[in-house]
Image: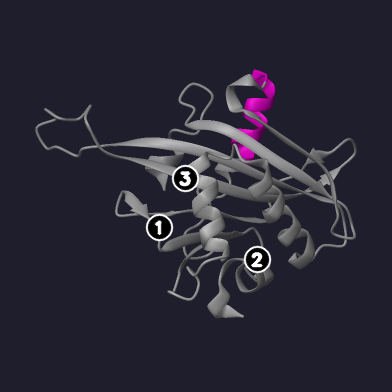
Amino acid sequence: MLELTRRMTLKRNCFTRISGAYIDEEGFVDGTFNTHFLKLSAKDQNTNIAIAKAIPFSETNVNLKEYRFTKEDERAGSTWQLMMALRECELKNDALLDVFYEVIGEKYRSKDQYAVYFFHGSYDVPIKSSDKTNQWESEEVYKFIICAICPIHGDYEPEAPECGFLFPAFTDRSSDIHGIEIFNADAENPHMELLEKIILSSAK
């Protein structure tokens, strides 16, 4: 994950798009946005990079755990299929995003208002070469989405993410569409509904 998060800075930005929704205490969407990441001000880019980076930069196997999809999880109409479509369209399809926001609003447990942020990014995975002759060539382009769920206060000001995910999993320096990395800031009291009621059908 360190290799990936090194590209999550203002100067080495890997994000192309950001979208999100504000959800009230009753789980209803209170507003949405969707824009090219580089259209944000430098200040807003920094703020949102910190939100996105918190997911993969967290402690592996404690706050960030990998889960595997089964064939049932990947059936037509599944959340996996929705995430694949969001990754493919690079978050440019608001109708798909609205479906995801509604599912989170219905299933996610929160007593307060919160925001759901989606980030689309890509990373040219460089070839590892002992003689450094091919160090600028890419093995593949890892295209991914990050979801961060953050409490909000005041005028929709986000706090640090309390949970979220990275999809697809970044396994052995490569895309793994059959895996997902789930983040929980509080490892002792995780939001299991994100996994069991939203992400994995087989966990229900």
The span shown in magenta is 41-51
Residue type, label 1: Ile
Residue with the mark numbered 1: 177
**Quarter holding the C terminus?**
bottom right
Residue at 64%, 49% (x, y): give it. 96
N-term-proximal mark, 3 vs 2: 3
Foreground residue among 12 and 121: 121
- The picture quadrant where one finds residue 100 is bottom right
- The Cα atoms of the two marked residues, 1 and 2, are separated by 18 Å
Can the viewer see residue 200 in this picture?
yes
Q: Name the residue under label 2.
A: 194
Residue type at mark 3? Phe
Q: Residue at the spot x=65%, y=34% of the render? A: 48
Query: Secondary structure under badge 1?
Result: loop
Q: Residue 144 carries which label?
A: 3
Give the residue drawn at x 21%, y 30%.
137
Disc 1 and disc 3: Cα gap in Å?
10 Å
Rendering coords of residue 144 (x, y %): 47, 45
Establish if 106 lies above or below 157: below
* Label 1 vs 2, first from the N-terminus: 1
Q: Identify which residue is drawn at 88% across, 53% down.
A: 24
Could one spot residue 63 in this view of the protein?
Answer: no
Q: Which mark is residue 69?
A: none
Choose the circle earlier in sequence order: 1 or 3: 3
Q: Which of 187 and 73 is in front in this view?
A: 73
| Horizontal side, residue 197 vs residue 64: left or right | right
Tell me if label 1 and label 3 are in contact, CB under 8 Å: no
